[in-house]
Image (cartoon, rainbow, N blue to C red):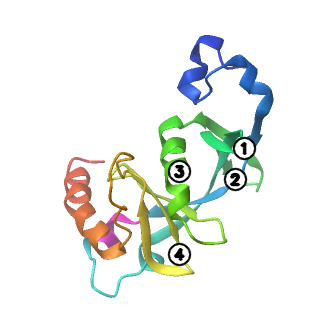
Amino acid sequence: MDKIPINSLGDYGIDSVEKLSFVTLGEAYKLYEINPDCVLKLNNDTTLADILSPTFEWFFPVLIDQATVAMLRVEQDTNGKAQVVSFGYAPLAKQIEHAKPDLHSCIQPALIVSYQAREFFLGYPSEQPTYLYDLQNNPQAKSKPDTQLQSILKRLQPIIRQNLQAGY
């Protein structure tokens, strides 16, 4: 944290130097990746377990006064040692903070990414196989976000197809 230039603190979700002494880490979110080919082959019986690939990465919430302001990305190397690979993700942190009231599980959700759709989600792969919380939900929206796996994946299909064709 001491390597962050003072004039860049806001880019990391921290609004003042004084807040640095109150920073703590929250419980890690295990990162899973959505397999784009599985999304394109979607059928009515598809579950989260069918489309996810585990990674060797975790995102730790960076907390100030119990609010998520940034994320610390940690990766396990080939020797099994954890290494910090990046810090920041303030927009993702805000999305996760906004989602907290809607999550009604007593366990930490998994953080799920579709690199081809450039979107993050929260889910419970083994406990709720058809639940996927869309973190791109507009915080000002008056309705609850769509959490139905099938409808979200159908929305992602054309985006993923287009980005795969573009080489992404």
**What amino acid is found at the position of numbered circle 3 in the picture?**
Ile
Residue count near mark 2 (Cα–Cα under 10 Å), binned few <14, some 14–19, many ≥20 = some
Q: In the image as oriented, which residue stretches furthest toward the front?
A: 142
Q: Which residue is mark 2?
A: 76
Q: Which residue is mark 3?
A: 96
**What amino acid is found at the position of numbered circle 4 in the picture?**
Pro
Q: Nearer the viewer, mark 3 or mark 1?
A: 3
Residue count near mark 3 (Cα–Cα under 10 Å), binned few <14, some 14–19, many ≥20 = many
Q: Nearer the viewer, mark 4 or mark 1?
A: 4
**What amino acid is found at the position of numbered circle 1 in the picture?**
Gln
- Whether residue 78 is visible, yes or no, is yes
Q: Which residue is mark 1?
A: 83
Q: Give the mark, 3 or 2, whose residue is nearer the N terminus.
A: 2
Residue range in magenta is 35-39
> What label sits on residue 29 in the rendered view?
none
Q: Which residue is mark 4?
A: 125
Which residue is located at x 36 percent, y 52 percent?
137
Q: Nearer the viewer, mark 3 or mark 2?
A: 3
Q: CA distance from mark 3 to mark 4?
A: 17 Å
| In the image, residue 2 lies in the stretch drawn in magenta | no
Report if the CB atoms under discs 2 and 1 are less than 8 Å apart. yes
Report if the CB atoms under discs 3 and 4 are less than 8 Å apart. no
Residue 56, above or below 84: below
